[in-house]
Amino acid sequence: MTDANFNTTYGIVGAGPAGVIAAYLLARQGVLLLEAHHDFDRDFRGDTIHAGIMELLDEMGLAEELLKLPHAKMQTLGLTANGVTQQIVDFRDTGSRFPYVTMMPQCQFLEFIVDRARAFNTFSIRMGARVTGLTTTGRGYGIEFKEDGVVHTVVADLIIAADGRHSTIRKLMELHPKQTSVPMDVLWFRKHSLIYFRT
């Protein structure tokens, strides 16, 4: 079953940090944000907001309100070995207005930005919207997505692919990213498990 087109200025695929910030910044001009999941209630790799990002949020008029939400501030980072703790980072020396790392669940951050974008009647978000294909229109590319068994088409002046490392849009356009390695690994500790991933 196919539904009528959605017409908008910007179509954004992926409601992660990049997608929701782009949607908020462009909301006044008309944005449809598509997110494949039905909600933000899941595990994310990053639950931190660094000083530079806080400064940008401050310029957008969002930092003060964001910090009213439950969060923690990490001002220093240390490493303990053989009973000796060595401080390796002190964020208080950065000269930033926000001399710390804000510890906040990413789901809470995403919901906050989306909620602020909803203040504009030219913004809309579709949760559970899985992109299934691209189509060519008189304005360039359009997006086909499936929601509750119904296929919709988004016609936009610009499509922004913010759908992560395993981007569906990139695959549909047959774009192949160049693989590079970085000289670090990360150990991610959770309450009763150890999650290892290579960055």
Image: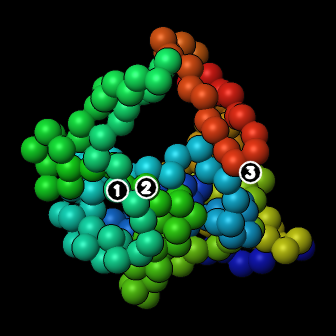
Amino acid beneath label 3: Gly
Residue name at image x 41 percent, y 23 percent: 84
User: In the rendered structure, are the residues bearing label 1 and label 2 in contact, judged by CB atoms less than 8 Å apart?
Assistant: yes
Amino acid beneath label 1: Lys
Tell me if I can see residue 176 in this picture.
no
Residue named by callout 2:
103
Picture quadrant of residue 149: bottom right
Q: Residue 35, image x and y in percent?
A: 65, 62
Residue name at image x 57 percent, y 64 percent: 107
Residue name at image x 38 percent, y 69 percent: 24
Q: Earlier in the sequence, mark 2 or mark 3?
A: 2
Other-residue count near label 2 (Cα within 10 Å), few / some / many at <14 / 14–19 / ≥20:
some
Q: Earlier in the sequence, mark 1 or mark 2?
A: 1
Residue name at image x 34 percent, y 56 percent: 73
Q: Nearer the viewer, residue 166 or 85?
A: 85
Tell me if I can see residue 154 in this picture.
yes
Q: Earlier in the sequence, mark 3 or mark 1?
A: 1
Residue named by callout 1:
73
Residue 42 relative to residue 57: left or right: right
Q: Residue 189, image x and y in percent?
A: 64, 38
What colour scheme does the image use?
Answer: rainbow
